[in-house]
Image: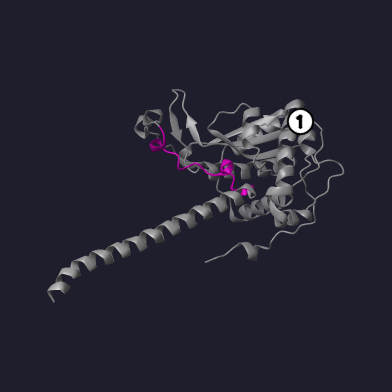
Amino acid sequence: MALLSVLTPVLAVILCLVIGFMLLNSRSTETTSTSAGKTDGTSKADFRPWVDQDLQDDTEITAKDDDGNDWVDSNEEEDLPHVPYFPPRYPEETMLQRSKDMYTLLNQRRSVRFISPEPVPREVIDNVIRTAGTAPSGAHTEPWTFVVVSDPETKHQIRQIVEEEEEVNYRQRMGDKWVSDLARLRTNWIKDYLDVAPYLVLIFKQTYGILPNGKKKTHYYNEISVSISCGILLAALQNVGLVTVTSTPLNCGPQLRLLLKRPANEKLLMLLPVGYPASDATVPDLKRKPLDDIVVHI
């Protein structure tokens, strides 16, 4: 019994050491597994450009991520007065007709890859972009920059950058399924319209703002805000009889930002070739989902 009483603490210590070793070994295995998963994920990301960090929202950027003195304090901004708001109110019959007219107009919108080189008045483009600039944005930061390119040489440089990366996307990064899904639409990495269209509109999201005094300002929900603006832009283009095709030039953003001399706080979200449709333009015979498939009334 005396021997047992002496050995009991020793056995307890040994047992604790064994359990501790087992737990430590288990954690090492999990860490290795996680690391391997991350490595695999990184490898897959190289072949899945839709997770390109250049397209991710940077709302999480805050003063804590950088030198606090570089960021504007909300207390430094002036309080905004509120003013009366009296939008037009229509009779129900007029509302119904206007809703039908708007649907008819936008239901004609299609992605068009055959664009005429015919000139388009610049004032029309400016008004269309003004319209896009009416979009709502997080804390009214208006985190968008529209770069309108009409210079032939710059358009050609943009095409070269896009086609070089798009060929790699189609051949390696996108994967067989994505390429197969696009085959029926007859798209590939050749982008003739980038040279032909009278205008290329490149929409950049501002991941944060830079004030005149050099301080940075957080742009909340910048990607969502700019995406809404792009939707309004598409509607405005349709309204004036112009066409485009939405393009998210994957892995081209940094090169295009440098080419266009845009600051580091801007990231390319979308590229739109804009013009009249070519006289021989065609589009895939696609059908839209019926209302019952896209709406739920509760």
Residue situated in front as seen by the camera: 214 or 234:
214
* Residue 7 placement (x, y as % from top left): 19, 69
Residue under the image location 63 percent in, 37 percent down:
253
| Furthest-front residue in this view | 3
* Residue 67 placement (x, y as % from top left): 39, 31
Residue named by callout 1: 156
* Residue 151 placement (x, y as % from top left): 74, 26
Residue situated in front as seen by the camera: 93 or 71:
71
| Furthest-top residue in this view | 213
Count how many numbered circles sit on residues in the image.
1
Verify whether residue 58 appears in magenta.
yes
Q: Is residue 134 visible?
A: yes
> Horizontal placement of 191 versus 234: left or right?
right
| Furthest-right residue in this view | 280
Mark 1 element type:
helix
User: What span is colored magenta in the figure?
Assistant: 49-66
> Where on the picture, by quarter, is residue 74?
top left
Q: Looking at the picture, does residue 195 appear above or below residue 108?
A: above
Residue under the image location 62 percent in, 48 percent down:
50
> Horizontal placement of 289 versus 212: left or right?
right
